[in-house]
Image: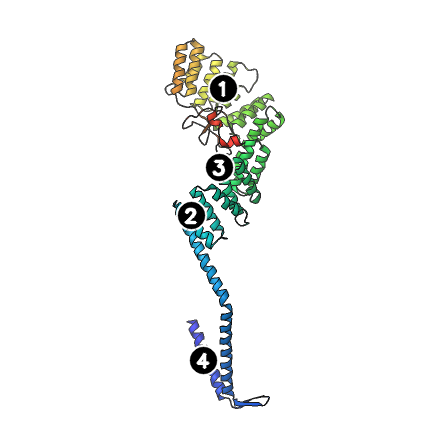
Amino acid sequence: MVRIILFLLLIALGAAGAAWVAEQTGDVVLSWGGYRIQTTLPVFVLALGIVIVAAMMSWAILRGLWRTPERVRRNRRERRHARGRHAITQGLLAIGHGDSTAARIHAEAARKHAAHDPLSLLLHAQSAQLDGDREGAQRAFRAMAEREDTRLLGLRGLFIEAQRADDPVAAVMVAEEALKLSPSSSWASHAVLGFCCAKGDWAGALKILDNNQSAGLIDKATYRRQRGVLLTARALELEKVDRDLARESVMEAVKLAPTLVPAAVLASKFESEAHQTRRSMRIVETAWLAQPHPDLADAYAHVKLGDSARQRLVRVETLAAKMPGHVEGALAVARAAIDASEFTKAREALAPFIAAPTQRVALLMAELERTEHGDSGRARAWTLRAVRALHDPAWTADGYVSDRWRPVSPVTGRLDAFQWQTPVAALPSDKGPAIESSAFEEAM
């Protein structure tokens, strides 16, 4: 509505101006050399307008002719770009539904029409991966890694290819380069952290963990827990080499992660050696309330050096009473009772679990029969029953079962992966070759 009103006002102003010019009297005389032109003012204004319009039209035509080649080239580029984008879109869709042939065709089309488009390189790499062409995928990812705008993406692709080729050393080298470019890259940080742990480079692992927190990759609670895990691993490694640093590390670890079983066990041991019995007991009790564990019970039983077997039994009974009805408490009491020759107490502790015993319950019953009565027949029966009994909890991570705690999973390199739980299916001990053949560990 406003535009219509403005248009009508312009027409009115133009008409008023034309009428005013037509009403003017007088002549316009142009004299140039021997020529003399004389005309009225309205005719002059009309002629001037015609000349101006003609000049503008001529300029527009000339400019259009001048720009035609560039316009043709631009249109050609736009058509090529559109074809390239279409090929990229269709190729990515083909990869999404697993059509390797279509993906390869569209990747070639994208390379032809949009060779410098980052998505074209990505399509070519993923198409090669879908075809199983590892060399082609690596070439594409290397090309991406050489470009500033796709360097991190290319390194990520090379990292994945190195993992698929079971080459963890190459994978970590790529991850280290990516971490230098982008400290907030979670996949690179995870890989390098796992590598540092596998090498026993705890200082390097702690530095990366600090960087992860600074970059916002982990929250404060996760940072405290994982730092506790790394410090515990360092303390366990240095326990017989540098006891001062081991003690310092595990004491910080138990403050950061008081429920971490290996940290509590080692810290309790150091406190016991320093004759800090109450402090040692508190450390174990805190971890026990979160996760009863046989190592905690053993540490609690021996917090005071030189105690008799009966004194250890009394102490273990105190610990077990903090989690009544728990099988670990019953096993700990039975173990201490057998050592103290309190066989009745041992039987009473195990009685609630005899109907459906775990392997440790059955083996402890076998020992009880052998020790108390010298009954090898009953002991053998319990031993055979242990073979078919329920599995006890074990340190488990990513389907890997270990007879000791580890800071990282040997399968994935994930930090703080091991949990004390009943495995879905029992695997051989980590002393056997079936477990030690992990590619992650072998490369280290």
Q: Are marks 4 and 1 in contact (CB under 8 Å)?
A: no
Give neighbour class at mark 3: few <14, some 14-19, many 20+ (Cα, 10 Å): few
Determine the secondary structure under disc 2: helix
Q: Which of the two marks, 3 or 1, is nearer to us in this view? A: 3
Q: In this figure, which residue is indicated by the disc labeled 2?
A: 104
Identified by mark 2, the residue type is: Arg
Q: Is residue 300 left or right of residue 127?
A: right
Identified by mark 3, the residue type is: Ala
Q: Which of the two marks, 3 or 4, is nearer to us in this view? A: 3
Query: Residue 334 falls in which quadrant of the image?
Result: top left
Give neighbour class at mark 4: few <14, some 14-19, many 20+ (Cα, 10 Å): few
Q: Is residue 353 left or right of residue 226?
A: left
Q: Residue at x 54, y 19 (%)?
A: 302
Q: In this figure, which residue is indicated by the disc labeled 3?
A: 165
Q: CA distance from mark 3 to mark 1?
A: 51 Å
* Residue 218, image x, y percentages: 52, 40
Q: Which mark is first along the chain, 1 or 3?
A: 3
Q: Which of the two marks, 4 or 1, is nearer to us in this view? A: 4
Q: CA distance from mark 4 to mark 1?
A: 107 Å
Q: Which mark is first along the chain, 1 or 4?
A: 4
Q: Is 171 or 321 nearer to us in this picture?
A: 171
Q: Residue at x 42, y 20 (%)?
A: 359
Give neighbour class at mark 1: few <14, some 14-19, many 20+ (Cα, 10 Å): many
Whether residue 368 is visible to the viewer of this picture, yes or no, is yes
Q: In this figure, which residue is indicated by the disc labeled 1?
A: 316
Identified by mark 4, the residue type is: Ala
Q: Is residue 295 above or below residue 373?
A: below
Q: In this figure, which residue is indicated by the disc labeled 4?
A: 12
Determine the secondary structure under disc 4: helix
